[in-house]
Amino acid sequence: MRLIITHEQPDFDALASLALAKLVFPGSFATVQGGLGDGVRTFIHLYRDQLELLEVDQIDLAEISELVVVDTADRTRIKPFDELIGKVPITLYDHHPRPGNAIPAARGLVEQVGATATLLTRQLRTRGIEVSPSLASLALLGIHEDTGNLSYELTKPDDYEAAAYLLRCGASLELVQKFTREVYRTEHRTFQETMLEHAREITLAGHHLVVSSFHYPQYLPGVSSLCSQLLTLFSADAALLVVRMGEKTLLFGRAHQNFDVAAAFAEAFGGGGHPGAAFAKADVDPDTALETALETMERYAVPVLTAATLMSHPVKTIRDDATVTEAQRLLIHYGHNGVPVIDKEEQLVGILSRRDLERALRHGLGRSSVVGFMSRDIITADEGSTLAELEELVMTNNVGRLPIMRGNELVGIVTRTDLIAARHETKATQIPSDRVLSRLPTMVLDVLAKAAEAAPDTAIYLVGGTVRDALLGTGLQDLDLVLEAGNAQRLGRILKSSFGGRLNCHQGFGTCTLVLPSGLVIDLATAREEYYRHPGALPTVTPSTLRKDLSRRDFTVNALALRFHPKPATLLDPYGGLADMEAKELKLLHPLSFIEDPTRILRGARLAGRLGFHFDDITLQRAKAALIPEVLDKVSRERLRSELELCCQEPRPGPALFYLEEIGALGAMFNLSVDRQLLLTLDELAQQIALPGESCLLALLLRLEDDRVGAHFEAFRWPKRYLQARGRLLDIERRELVRDEDLERLGEAGRAVVKAFGPELRARVTAFEKVPRRRKLRGQDVLDLGLASGPEVGKVLEEVARARAAQRVHTFEEELELARNLIAELPALLHSEE
């Protein structure tokens, strides 16, 4: 089974991420381990039916085939499931900085946004998967909790966008307010009083800290939020709460942008968290732990902004014997709103503002000395004054500029505009290459490092869907690597020797596929170009450059590459794929691309459905132009069938198939049409359970016109079982009575289609699937009762099946007894049939 887990003592972001991951991976199970805070425990009790969490002691580790880990990459925080690391494939979603002992996940997404729920919400939104109001409320609660109601420095635009989407899904702000509003028990208020008694303010690396360290007589859960209270009550840059409870000293850290508490705690204690909120445990007493924490935090402090950093210099000044007109010209020339005035010894004697000069000029005093209009009450600061101190001087004295002095020497000036800019400085936008690499799972980074080591003189690129999905933030599935003037097969063998797995190489195409034990699929290729001998043929390839390799791809969004070796990492976008991603458009690279290979239309529709994209106008025209017999007849039906099967294996096949019908491809290529309601219902089911791709195919084949069924099945060589399943499905759709034999023979894929027929049949199939499979009456059992072989055996079996469907018999013994009675009454039974 696939199991979704999170860190011990989960918060709301962890709980929300579990629930959202169940939508991303339908059919999965989930659990929480460790102690629960009061709020999380209450929420789980209220929404137990929606969350459907397993108890840890109900889970047999031997039955777990895959792990999905959310909201932590720290292997020490997922016990007992850390025993499965290296034994089963792992997918990971996390928003924290990578710890030193990171879980070696092969798939998923790691990105430092405000909450892991943001990452999963973005993926669900991209896929078009609907989030229920109750789950949207939980996800919004998780985002609000981890971002301080979207106010912490670590909050990103993605968090706001996710919150807006969840509100559109029906999230309840009332519920968010209810669970983010702290309600403390008597013991928490006692703890709070003790914390405040021991609180003291200090300065560390120029920043204002509040710390509280003490022993507490008993363990009390849910005190981390009290550390946030310290931060707020004292208006500090950071707060540390260090308390001995039981056999351990617990450390809680909260900070604004001036400290990376998580990095400090990780170095000092092996703790974890993110820059603004972290937790650790220690064996030493609270005062010793606090001293260690402060020593380490000083190394992870952001340098304090001082006047020396903020000031403009050299300073433009004017002599005290200058005229008002001269001063006005100086301000206009430099675009300043004020200027310091100095005497002949270059000592500061006053400040002149534009307003003062304009007032003098209105009265015709342009030839007057500036001395009569300057302010002599000068407020100054020294070079070591901090940003906060400078702001206080400006606000208290209502001045627009502060001369910065070194003793009696004027060395700079800080204006109100400088202070505003310092507080609202736009952080450098993360360049696309860094964004791609920062989002890759740990194991993928290990693979890239090994590839660079194995081919030191070769340019190696991440390409295609790997780059596209990393930029979109939808989580990595597989890894595509291209070597320029390198040997892909040699690199494949080296990677296999380091990571294990199965390697399959294609000499003619210069490509290899390595499937790691973790499940990660790595496609390796030497840069190449290709051409088609005729429409619909497989390509002929020759070695070439990376740019030529990209040019042979289908859509611009797939023609992106990131050179990760040699450094520095560089993103290549020769065909405008980034702009098309922003516009959510699929744009062909070549005018004849669909003519050369019409299956690209199917691949494009599949991609459009998965990402919520669409063909641009020209690409749409070219798709329709390729849907003619002269082009389609040159493509083998096997290739068309294979691409349609891939469409049906998408997590939600509906959008791709609707798009194919909309552009006319489904009818032109397959003579098929879409039962929209049936597919929409299947898509809804796919959000709850893992549906086989065959369910979608059966739904399509079900609506084939009867007189075309034979020719269609022969042309596309569909398996015979599909034809049999189609007949059973049509029979069930037309009848009120559904036999267990039919449901059993349909298999999981066919039963999913029956569920989509309507609520009553869905309930019938669900009840059937919940009942353990029992022995049922077979033909041999009837023969063993003494009835001779012949049509009478079938009559008996049919009557027993009717009784089973009507639930008049419930065990094999009851069926056997009914068969005896039927054999005794066989003449009457046969007569009634006549």
Image (cartoon, grey):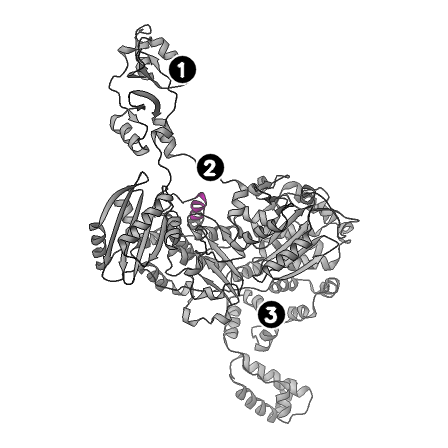
C-alpha span from label 1 to label 3: 87 Å
Q: Amino acid at mark 3?
A: Arg
Which residue appears at 30% of the width and 27% of the height? 382
Q: Which residue is at the front of the view, 41 or 267?
A: 267
Q: Which residue is mark 1?
A: 332
Q: Secondary structure at mark 3?
A: helix
- Give the label, 3 or 2, closer to the camera: 2
Q: Amino acid at mark 2?
A: Ala
Q: Residue 301: within the magenta?
A: no
Work out whether mark 2 precedes mark 1 in sequence or the reverse, and give the earlier one. Answer: 1
Q: Which residue is mark 3?
A: 734
Q: Which residue is at the front of the view, 53 or 595?
A: 53
Whether residue 609 is visible here, answered yes or no, is yes
Whether residue 673 is visible here, answered yes or no, is no
Residue 111 image position (x, y, % from top left): 47, 49
Label 1 neighbour load within 10 Å: few <14, some 14-19, many 20+: few
- Residue 642 location, quadrant: bottom right
- Give the label, 2 or 1, closer to the camera: 2
Q: Which mark is residue 402?
A: none
